[in-house]
Image (cartoon, helix red, strand yellow):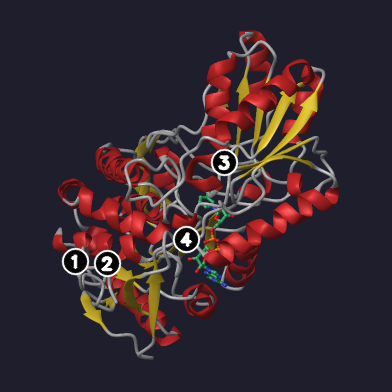
């Protein structure tokens, strides 16, 4: 059974070389609503042959098609049209995202607004001339540095922010003049399929954008183990990122990986208390903690720790959990039953490691939530840096609490992670705040705020959180080659 509100929108197959085609295997996959386990839609499941054909279509569109050579004004006009269509369909897309991921409708709407901003940002940025003339000290020589599209791109996205994450790749790739194969997560492919339909409606030339949804493990080889691809942009887990880097190395394919995080949120005793409680809670429990930049490690000054943790727990217990389509819900279910089992294993591990369970640690008792993959916001106090629950990305509604006595200790703990995606610092002392934000080895650092980003500023990880940048000017450069033209006149 399919969700009636989106009807047969997804009974269209894969998008290859400008045509919607059926999967060559005839396989399909049911997409389940995490709120109640019902089937939202059934989609075609691509086979490796389909992925190979998609790469070939993108290759032909790059080598023989017009897109890479299309004037930038036409490319940016297409992006502006895509943004208009996203705005037109905002409510439908938000509903699809909520049905597929479980996040609240309010969160999904914010995601769609952000996708629109990203498309408009890259439409503006690409229009700015970035080529330059270099003085080589010879009057007979004109030396120019120009930017050209990198070529065929494979864009692989995770399940937590499906539309948002894929837009961070598709928008700059289109702006740069690349052609591409888009591979959403098999767990949440629906909004990406809807997005590609809008891109088709906007008039993208044949073969420029291709879409194959299906298992990454099955399609990964066809998409990454090939000399026909020039750039792979991957967002997902560390383990998958390593596999892709190793595979791509055989072909010397450029790869940008945006990986996980275990992000510290450091609270000094002089920080604004009420605001800190709000932001620590939202920072970790937004989208049930299934956020790469979730502030899952609270590092709090000793003198306020007991009081602060008690205030957090009291507030966490009041978070209203329910179907994301219900406007009263403040948080939805986890993405799947399988993911909830992973969270349950982490909670059991935390208890066995000796962390003190302050609140949560179980499924909700509300019988109305029984059919969904819900899990209570969970806080562990008295954690220590050696615990796996502190070191590993749980990617769920689990907050661990560590305590510190001095600024040096806070900084050391904040950097004591193999990841380096994001961190937060809360203090009323601006000099200390500046020392902390400069000392933390993370790609984004918030001072007295948490979780914000903008299309115009780069996003990416230090250390094992990744090696590339999305958003901002660097997010466009990833999709460009730099050519030096030396012209002896
Ligand atoms: P995942 O690594 O399991 O899957 C990510 C994508 O890779 C999916 O589309 C999957 O199908 C595909 N894939 C799997 N195996 C593959 C292979 N061998 N070859 C090619 N593709 C393959 O990650 P996930 O569980 O979907 O997402 C959660 C992870 O994503 C978390 O670690 C989270 O922190 C991270 N994430 C990072 C950012 C960021 O900006 N750094 C943003 C969102 C999510």
Residue that sits furthest to the bottom in the current view = 25
- The residue that disc 2 covers is 208
Quick check: marks 2 and 1 in contact, CB under 8 Å?
yes
Of the image marks 4 and 3, the number of the one nearer the N terminus: 3
- The residue that disc 1 covers is 205
Q: Quadrant of residue 357?
A: top right
Quick check: marks 2 and 4 in contact, CB under 8 Å?
no
- Local packing at callout 1 (Cα closer than 10 Å; few below 14, some 14-19, many 20+) is some
Per the model, the C-alpha gap separating discs 3 and 2 is: 34 Å
Q: Nearer the viewer, residue 102 or 186?
A: 102
The label nearer to you, 4 versus 1, is 4
For the N terminus, the quadrant is: bottom left
Of the image marks 1 and 3, the number of the one nearer the N terminus: 1
Quick check: marks 3 and 2 in contact, CB under 8 Å?
no
Q: Is mark 1 within 8 Å of ligand 1?
A: no
- The residue that disc 3 covers is 294
Q: Secondary structure at mark 1?
A: loop
Q: Nearer the viewer, residue 435 or 291?
A: 291
Per the model, the C-alpha gap separating discs 2 and 4 is: 38 Å
- The residue at 68%/45% (across/down) is 419
Q: Secondary structure at mark 4?
A: loop
- The residue at 78%/27% (across/down) is 403
Position of residue 272 measured from the top left corner of the image (x, y, whole percent): 58, 13
Which mark, residue 17? none
Q: Secondary structure at mark 2?
A: loop
- The residue that disc 4 covers is 372
Q: Nearer the viewer, residue 281 or 209?
A: 281
Q: Quadrant of residue 174?
A: bottom left
């Amino acid at each position: 059974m399919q969700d009636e509100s989106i009807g047969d929108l997804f009974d269209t197959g894969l998008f290859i070389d400008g045509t919607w085609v059926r999967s060559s295997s005839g396989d399909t996959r049911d997409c389940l609503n995490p709120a109640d386990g019902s089937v939202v839609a059934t989609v075609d499941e691509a086979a490796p042959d389909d992925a190979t054909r998609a790469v070939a279509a993108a290759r032909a569109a790059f080598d023989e098609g017009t897109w890479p050579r299309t004037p930038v004004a036409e490319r940016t006009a297409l992006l502006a049209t895509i943004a208009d269509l996203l705005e037109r369909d905002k409510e439908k897309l938000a509903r699809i995202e909520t049905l597929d991921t479980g996040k609240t409708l309010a969160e999904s709407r914010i995601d769609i607004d952000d996708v629109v901003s990203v498309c408009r940002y890259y439409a503006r940025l690409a229009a700015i001339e970035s080529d330059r003339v270099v003085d080589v000290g010879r009057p007979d020589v004109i030396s120019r540095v120009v930017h050209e599209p990198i070529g065929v791109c494979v864009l692989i996205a995770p399940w937590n922010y499906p539309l948002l994450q894929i837009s961070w790749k598709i928008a700059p790739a289109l702006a740069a003049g690349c052609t591409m194969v888009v591979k959403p997560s098999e767990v949440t492919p629906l909004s990406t399929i809807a997005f590609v339909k809008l891109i088709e409606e906007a008039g993208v030339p044949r073969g420029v954008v291709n879409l194959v949804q299906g298992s990454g493990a099955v399609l990964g080889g066809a998409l990454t183990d090939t000399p026909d691809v020039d750039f792979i942009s991957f967002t997902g887990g560390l383990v998958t990122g390593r596999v892709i880097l190793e595979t791509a190395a055989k072909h010397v394919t450029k790869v940008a990986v945006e990986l996980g995080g275990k992000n510290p949120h450091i609270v000094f005793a002089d920080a604004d208390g009420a605001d800190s409680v709000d932001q620590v809670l939202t920072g970790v429990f937004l989208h049930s903690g299934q956020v790469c930049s979730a502030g899952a490690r609270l590092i709090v000054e000793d003198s306020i720790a007991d009081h602060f943790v008690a205030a957090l727990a009291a507030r966490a217990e009041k978070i209203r959990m329910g179907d994301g389509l219900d406007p009263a819900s403040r948080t939805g279910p986890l993405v799947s039953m399988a993911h909830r089992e992973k969270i349950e294993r982490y909670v059991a591990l935390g208890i066995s490691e000796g962390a003190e369970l302050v609140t949560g640690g179980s499924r909700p008792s509300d019988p109305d939530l029984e059919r969904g993959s819900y899990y209570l916001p969970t806080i562990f106090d008295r954690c220590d840096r050696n615990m796996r629950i502190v070191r590993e990305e749980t990617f769920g509604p689990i907050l661990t609490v560590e305590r510190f006595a001095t600024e040096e200790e806070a900084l050391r703990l904040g950097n004591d992670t193999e990841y380096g995606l994001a961190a937060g610092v809360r203090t009323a002392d601006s000099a200390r705040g500046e020392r902390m934000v400069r000392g933390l080895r993370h790609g984004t650092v918030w001072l007295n705020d948490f979780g914000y980003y903008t299309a115009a500023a780069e996003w990416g990880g230090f250390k094992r959180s990744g090696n590339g940048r999305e958003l901002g000017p660097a997010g466009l450069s990833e999709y460009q080659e730099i050519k030096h033209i030396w012209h002896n006149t």
